[in-house]
Amino acid sequence: MKEIQRVSPVVFKSTPVKTKTRDNWEVVMEYSEEGDGPFLVDLSHRPRFDLQDSNLAAQKPFGIEIPETPGICVLEKGVLANRMNGTQVSLYNLDSDDTAVMPDESGYTDVTESTMCVALIGKNVFSICEKLTALDFMDPQRKAPFLFQGPFSHVPCQIVTLSKEGDISGLVLTCSRGYGRDMIHSILHAGEEFKLTPAGENRFTNWIKEL
């Protein structure tokens, strides 16, 4: 029987030097000439789910206490839970060693293949973002991780700031997969002056361990 191949909406022109097949995705672990950062990493293969329920307080997806306030996030057990509104939370699996399975309970939707997901990590990432959005990812009133829902390069997105700490600053961004090509082009173009380069999943895995 022929296996289904899952294809990321994110395409980089860089040359992969290490790849791994995971859950029918071909995951690039490292690109040639990644440089010293900042980095743009494709995470579209990482499982992502939406949970909608009128009583979210009674839910504990993957054993995680859901934040009570919209915009607040929590990162536990490799899963990022983002409170979106009164009835909805988005869940991203950021652990490369674990393939999260969507719970059997009602209210969950697998959005992995309908969306793209990238991480923008390292020095100067927020200077790059300033060229693409008016959202303030360095807001001193907000403690990382926190969620913004708004336009990024004129595209409706969910963006979570995971760190505001200098050279280990970073965020993850998701939007509809149909915007993948244009979004990547815009981010890389905005990051040219800061020497932004595509990087493999290993960069993200090592980075998130520092948080």
Image (spheres, rainbow, N blue to C red):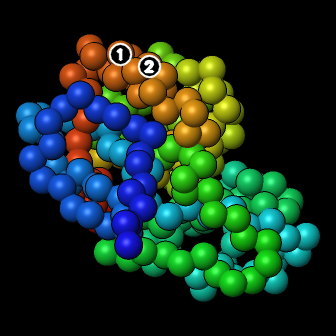
C-alpha span from label 2 to label 1? 5 Å
Q: Quick check: marks 2 and 1 in contact, CB under 8 Å?
A: yes
Viewer-proximal residue, 140 or 148? 148
**Figure check: 15 above or below 57:** above
Q: For this rendering, which residue is in front, 120 or 72?
A: 120
Give the secondary structure at mark 1: helix
**What kind of residue is marked 2?**
Ser
State left or right for residue 205 relative to residue 136: left
For image coordinates 78% across by 61% down, the residue present is 88
In the shown orientation, is residue 32 left or right of residue 47?
left
Q: Position of residue 77 (x, y in %)?
A: 46, 78
User: In which quadrant is the N terminus drawn?
Assistant: bottom left
Residue 1 makes an appearance in the image: yes
Point out which mark residue 175 bears. none
> Is residue 136 placed above or below 43 in the rendered structure?
above
Mark 2, residue position? 186
Mark 2 neighbour density, 10 Å: few (under 14) some (14–19) many (20 or more): some
Q: Is residue 169 visible?
A: no
Question: How would you rate the neighbour count of disc 1 (Cα within 10 Å): few for under 14, some for 14-19, many for 20 or more?
Answer: some
Rendered image: mark on residue 189: 1
Q: Identify the image quadrant of residue 192.
A: top left
